[in-house]
């Protein structure tokens, strides 16, 4: 699969490309497309079934009370818990089964997650920091399209990619720029409702490449631009300032970096003065071995709420919005990095006696006030 170029000229893989998009309904096909290329961004509506009426109602209400316990219902089907958000009429799989967790505990966790993800979606809409994908198998009437664009317009000028099946006049993989805030993309085919986990990957990627190129040409700001002075900065390595912030899961510092080791590496950072969201930025690189360990997954949580996951193959600059709702009332910000692929070099290569379970090397972490872009990797 071909790569494309980001604003900064660096190459975007298919996985990185699809992290520049976010689904807002009606089906979860786009979420499975992201999974097909190894992208696992967290999104409020990524795997939700949500009709246009409910989406417009949610947009108009700014997703008010979405995490209110009275509006969140837990049901079961074939032993799996499912979540229904009654006030906006959408449902999704919890990916948790009966016996894994008590329904009451799941209810508390899902209410909190809904609030965090709704805040993240609103921030992305207001910043115009990604392309929002809407897919509907039935024809979308002009009236419905106007309602949807009006709902999105309440947040500024986010770009909508509306996808539909290709026609003789509009071949698969093509994209039309219909207005300042609307692109129409054409897929080889729409999947059947029972086969949303099998998207037509080639035509989806062709559409996304073209849509991203159009969007990027009109973007005034890069995801990697400077956002001003950091309110907190941690520099790793023997000459850095990281020692007071390190908790479990760190190796001894080396000259310009420090390895995260084992399953989790934790930082405790003083909550900086001021209010509002923060943007977490990192410079890291993974422990990999060609043909043996090609990548490292990195999952980031703040104050026990998972915010982002990445699939690292080379040195990367990452960013992750941190909602203010996770910071209020906390003296410190507990940042946890989960490393499911940590491995011992000594077990991967003969003659290597290093017994540490290496995961990701950290060079720098910084927190900025405000959020300049989506969760992403560049």
Image (cartoon, grey):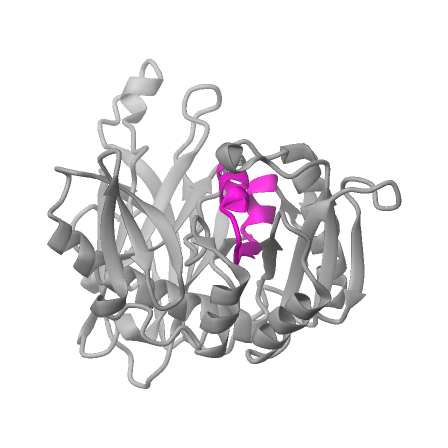
Q: Is residue 48 above or below residue 330?
A: above
Residue 75, given in percent of the width and then of the height, sits at 24, 48
Residue 32, given in percent of the width and then of the height, sits at 50, 39
Q: Is residue 261 above or below residue 68?
A: above
Residue pictured at 55% horizontal, 42% vertical: 15
Q: Quadrant of residue 345?
A: top left
* Whether residue 5 is visible: no
**Which span is picked out in magenta?**
14-35
Q: Nearer the viewer, residue 355 or 77?
A: 77
Taking the image as shown, residue 360 lies to the left or right of residue 207, namely left
Please identify the quadrant where the N terminus is shown. Answer: top right
Residue 178, given in percent of the width and then of the height, sits at 79, 64
Q: Is residue 363 magenta?
A: no
Q: Nearer the viewer, residue 260 or 103?
A: 103
Residue pictured at 26% horizontal, 74% vertical: 327
Taking the image as shown, residue 95 lies to the left or right of residue 221, namely left
Q: Is residue 70 above or below residue 257?
A: below
Which residue is outermost to the bottom?
A: 274
Q: Nearer the viewer, residue 202 or 333?
A: 202
Which residue is outermost to the right?
A: 169
* Whether residue 248 is visible: yes
Taking the image as shown, residue 247 lies to the left or right of residue 377, namely left
Residue pictured at 43% horizontal, 48% vertical: 47
Which residue is outermost to the top?
A: 350
Count of labels shown? Answer: 0
Residue pictured at 22% horizontal, 45% vertical: 264
Residue 342, given in percent of the width and then of the height, sits at 29, 33
Q: Is residue 15 magenta?
A: yes
């Amino acid at each position: 699969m071909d790569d494309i170029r980001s604003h900064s000229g660096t190459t975007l893989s298919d996985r990185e490309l699809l992290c520049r998009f976010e689904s807002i309904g009606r089906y979860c096909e786009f979420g499975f497309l992201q999974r097909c290329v190894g992208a696992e961004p967290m999104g409020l509506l990524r795997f939700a079934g949500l009709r246009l009426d409910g989406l417009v109602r949610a947009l108009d209400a700014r997703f008010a009370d979405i995490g209110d316990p009275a509006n969140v219902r837990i049901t079961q089907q074939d032993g799996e818990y499912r979540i229904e958000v009654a006030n906006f009429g959408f449902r999704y799989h919890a990916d948790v089964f009966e016996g894994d967790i008590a329904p009451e505990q799941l209810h508390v966790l899902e209410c909190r997650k809904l609030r965090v993800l709704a805040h993240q979606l609103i921030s992305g809409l207001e910043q115009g920091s990604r392309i929002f994908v809407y897919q509907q198998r039935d024809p979308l009437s002009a009236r419905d399209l106007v309602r949807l664009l009006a709902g999105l317009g309440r947040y500024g000028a986010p770009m909508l990619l509306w996808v539909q099946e290709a026609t003789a006049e509009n071949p698969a993989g093509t994209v039309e720029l219909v207005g300042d805030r609307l692109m129409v993309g054409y897929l080889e085919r729409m999947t059947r409702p029972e086969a949303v986990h099998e998207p037509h990957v080639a035509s989806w990627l062709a559409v996304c490449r073209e849509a991203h190129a159009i969007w990027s040409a009109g973007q005034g700001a890069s995801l990697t631009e400077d956002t001003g002075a950091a309110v907190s900065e941690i520099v790793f390595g023997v000459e850095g300032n990281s020692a007071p912030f390190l908790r479990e899961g760190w190796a001894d510092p080396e000259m310009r970096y420090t390895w995260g080791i084992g399953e989790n590496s934790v930082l405790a950072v003083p909550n900086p003065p001021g209010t509002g969201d923060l943007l977490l930025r990192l410079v890291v690189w993974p422990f990999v071995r060609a043909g043996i360990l090609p990548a490292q997954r990195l999952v980031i949580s703040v104050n026990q709420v998972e915010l982002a996951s990445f699939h690292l193959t080379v040195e990367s600059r990452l960013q992750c919005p941190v909602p203010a709702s996770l910071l209020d009332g906390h003296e410190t910000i507990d940042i946890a990095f989960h490393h499911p692929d940590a491995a011992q070099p000594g077990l991967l290569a003969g003659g290597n006696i290093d017994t540490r379970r290496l995961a990701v090397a950290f060079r720098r972490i910084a927190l900025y006030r405000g959020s300049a872009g989506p969760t992403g990797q560049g």
